[in-house]
Amino acid sequence: MIRQDYILRLVRQFADVVTVILGLKQAGRYEEARQTLDGELRRLTGLSPTLVGSLSSVELIKLTSVGDVLDLDRCLVLAHYLREQADISKALGQADESARSYTKALDLFLEVFVYHDDTYLRERLPAIEGIIAELEPYDLPAATLLRIVHLYEKTGEYGHAEDILYEMLEAGESEESLAEGIALYERLLTRDDKSLHKGNLPREEVEEGLERLRRIREGTARS
């Protein structure tokens, strides 16, 4: 509980600054908004904005981890920071930079809520889905798509999970992506029928999907 209170307090501190940044953006003072944002990142995490901008999602996750343990508060603040940076870049017409920041923000949010801690998942889900919507025109990395699959699985939106799974497979049917898809269907088969219907993926569709991917994997193995 103490840990959760600390994380929430840190995120709220950042949220207070975001309110200030919103006012600056509304006034068209984007560079000032960016400088304020950068200063808050340094204050709360000790990280350099230049370093954060140069690292990949995987590297940022490692940077905010001690061994295999993710520092949830720093990772969450960093995710919020990247989302705000993406919004500012978008407003300035810097589409590619905006997309990169949105993608990294999404990866960090999902790393926290899907793989480590779901305490605040429900209340932050609209923000996460908002980032997914911003990235709809872009081809996302397979690792990001897989995180989204796990997000929808965890929230019981199984039909959406399947949609993203096939988007990932269409990008390239690797052994890893096929294995992930088969594992998803096998996990879903352990759910009761009511949960599957509520998630818009009835049992018969799960069974059909599992059989389809198994056939594809067998065909890939023979070729």
Image (tube, rainbow, N blue to C red):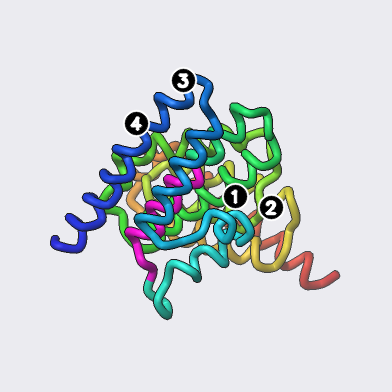
Label pair 1/3, CB-CB below 8 angstroms:
no
Does dot 2 land on a helix, a strand or a loop?
helix
Q: Judge whether residue 176 is colored magenta.
A: no
Mark number for residue 19? 4
**Left or right position of 47 against 43:** right
Mark number for residue 74? none
Q: Quadrant of the N terminus?
A: bottom left
> Which residue corresponds to mark 2?
169
Q: Judge whether residue 76 is colored magenta.
A: yes
Label pair 2/4, CB-CB below 8 angstroms:
no
> Which residue corresponds to mark 3?
26
Label total for image: 4
Does dot 4 land on a helix, a strand or a loop?
helix
Q: Earlier in the sequence, mark 1 or mark 3?
A: 3
Report the predominant secondary structure element of the magenta stretch.
Answer: helix
Extent of the magenta region: 70-83
Amino acid type, label 1:
Leu
**Can you tell which of label 1 and label 3 is closer to the viewer?**
3
Residue located at (85% from left, 69% from top) = 223
How crowded pointer 1 is (Cα within 10 Å; few <14, some 14-19, many 20+) is rated as many
Amino acid type, label 3:
Gln
